[in-house]
Amino acid sequence: MSLSLKKLLLLGILLPIISQQALLAQARFTATINPSSIGKNETAELRLMIENTGQVEQLVLPSLKDFIVVSGPNQESGIQNNNGVTKQYIGVSYQLRPKQKGNFTIGPASVKADGKILKTNAVTIEVTNSSSTNNQNGGSSALNPFSFFDEPVQQQADNRDFIIKKGENIAAKIDKNIFIKVDVDKTSCYIGEPIVVTYKLFTRLKSESNITKNPSFNGFSVIDLGQPGSSFYSIEKLNGRAYNVYTLRKSQLYPLQAGAMDIETVEVENNIHFIKETFLRSHQVNANDISNWERTGIPSEAMQDEKVTLQSKPIVISVKPLPDTNKPASFRGAVGNFTLQTGVEKNNLFSNDAGKLQLVIEGQGNIDLVNSPEIAWLPGIESYEPKVTESLNKQAVPVKGSKRFEYPFTVAKEGTYTLPAVEYSYFDPLLKKYKTITSKQIVITVAKGTGKIPVAKNDLITENSNGHFTETVFTNRLWFIFPVALLIFAGLFFWIKTENNKEKTKAIALKQKEIKPVIVEKINQVVNPLASTEAMLVQHDSKRFYEALNIELRKFLAGQLEVPGETINKKRIAEELDKKGVAVGTGLQIQQLLYDVEWQLYTPSTDENKMEEMYQAANTIVHSFNPVS
């Protein structure tokens, strides 16, 4: 056997393997738990990472019955570039606190991405009796201010509020020395303008504190700044008194609709430990030696425990609508400060070639909600759906980064074409006015090609040639014979079925008069597109309620917007609503409802209390398309 033939055989064996490995590297869905060993009062982060996929939907979580979900789902997305290899990712994370000690396995999660089902690996975690106030591995412990066995740095030496005197009012002492404070950087803003909200626990007492209810921020797009429930603290003075301050949660919120919006409360369960002054006196313990005494262990008869649930005060944000005056036709919801750059991959093309228009929006604002601009394509140029990539710093306020839109296009005839300038508008909340930025015109030259017609679809470009049709048929005979055979069998089946149906025609005609009134009656009935959702609402089945609402709402919108059900997603819905001139307020309500439904689907424990509210919101949307006469 010749060396060349050996090489060809070896290549034939390796190519399928290499191709398979390359295909597998395109999309990954992985799960990690960090840290893998925690104390029973600590939390760990479950992170689900989806890499190199486009449309992501139907995330199904594994059972989390052995844990309390302290926070989540917390979402992030972006692009990483390592050694020239670009990787796009979407991350969903949950902060979990175990219900008991032991070794636990969290099974695989699954997701539908680009039409395929992907599954993660299972992860294991060990839960012990030990507890650490300084978890270095990324998990956050239960808040443990002034722990008996781990005295925090900067503790105030003269603070003895944890000593309870005989006859002292315990409730008043608790109210004065431990509470939650909410800070917002502003109480009035425009739609799309960020608000930073920070929940802080102030304490001068000894306690273990666990977050039992996190705000869901309905009506806002949410980006968490840092890990919720951090065990680290600072010393702050309030009204002349020093407190240990723990940040429970810090988030930037982007309002999606106008009106008075509530910043929801956070709840923290506290197990407060007091030391009895009578015990200290009877055992002649000096107050200054308490810290050393605590390390050796405090007798239970010296302590008095009090349980209290703290709740923050609600805050109302006044969200102003974006002005209608001087609103440009090219405005699509961007709020902030942005720049625009455009360019083409190459200025000289052949008529059998495919080009690519690149457009980059960069700046600060609600950039993660920015949609693709409208392009006024010239006659003779056929364009395709853009590929969107983003590089965002979501820890910046407002979010900072860029979005790149790549529009594949083809030109059938040779000539010189001037691509018109692209216009993009945004609202500047600082100046309280709209701004319009315009790119430069781009000139491309198209030379006569080989006569093959290019077909472009994002990055996949193929060529069709009528000149090689005969050759293609004979090279791939089975590909043509099989469909022809199917057509023949289908024709025979149709003919036989038609003959059988003729026998039934007379019987059907005889009953026509009886059937017609029934048909008319059914047509006149008003079909409820939320029928299954309403049935689950009546049955108080929250899980099936949100599943039905997600399916029926998307099906209804697909029908109203005249798009295939399998392609319906939030981005497509926003684009089609804009094309049909649907009111901005209605569009925002639809986006918010879809977001809320997804939140309930992705959260292990659904909220039954929101079912009626969300059903009414969906019903309002349905009637906005089909007003009742």
Image: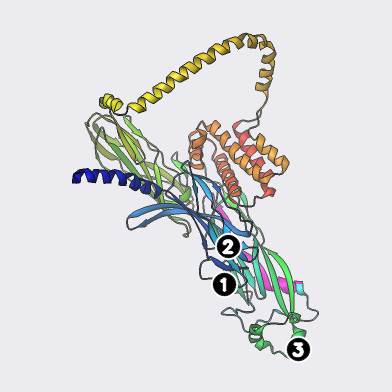
Q: Residue at x 50, y 18 (%)?
A: 493
Amino acid type shown at disc 3: Arg
For label 1, the residue is: 233
Question: Mark 3: which secondary structure?
Answer: helix
Q: Which residue is mark 2?
A: 249
Q: Quadrant of residue 128?
A: bottom right
Name, please, the residue furthest toward the front: 1
Residue 621 location, x and y as percent? 61, 37
Q: Viewed as shown, does residue 502 lie left or right of 521?
A: left
Amino acid at pointer 1: Tyr
Instruction: Identify the element where label 2 is drawn.
Output: strand
For the point 36% across and 56% down, which residue is it? 81
Q: CA distance from mark 3 to mark 2?
A: 41 Å
Q: Quadrant of the C terminus?
A: top right
Query: Where does the image place residue 220, in percent across and percent down from the top left?
Result: 57, 51
Circle 1 crowding by C-alpha within 10 Å: few under 14, some 14–19, many from 20: some
Q: Please tell me which of labels 1 and 3 falls first in the chain.
A: 1
Who is closer to the viewer here, 318 or 89?
89
As drawn, the label of residue 281 is 3
In this picture, is 553 found above or below 78?
Answer: above
Tag 2 or tag 1, which sits nearer the N-term?
1
**What span is colored magenta in the figure?**
171-192
Q: Quadrant of the N terminus?
A: top left
- Sort mark 2 into few (<14), some (14-19) or many (20+) by Cα contacts within 10 Å: many
Q: Residue at x 31, y 47 (%)?
A: 14
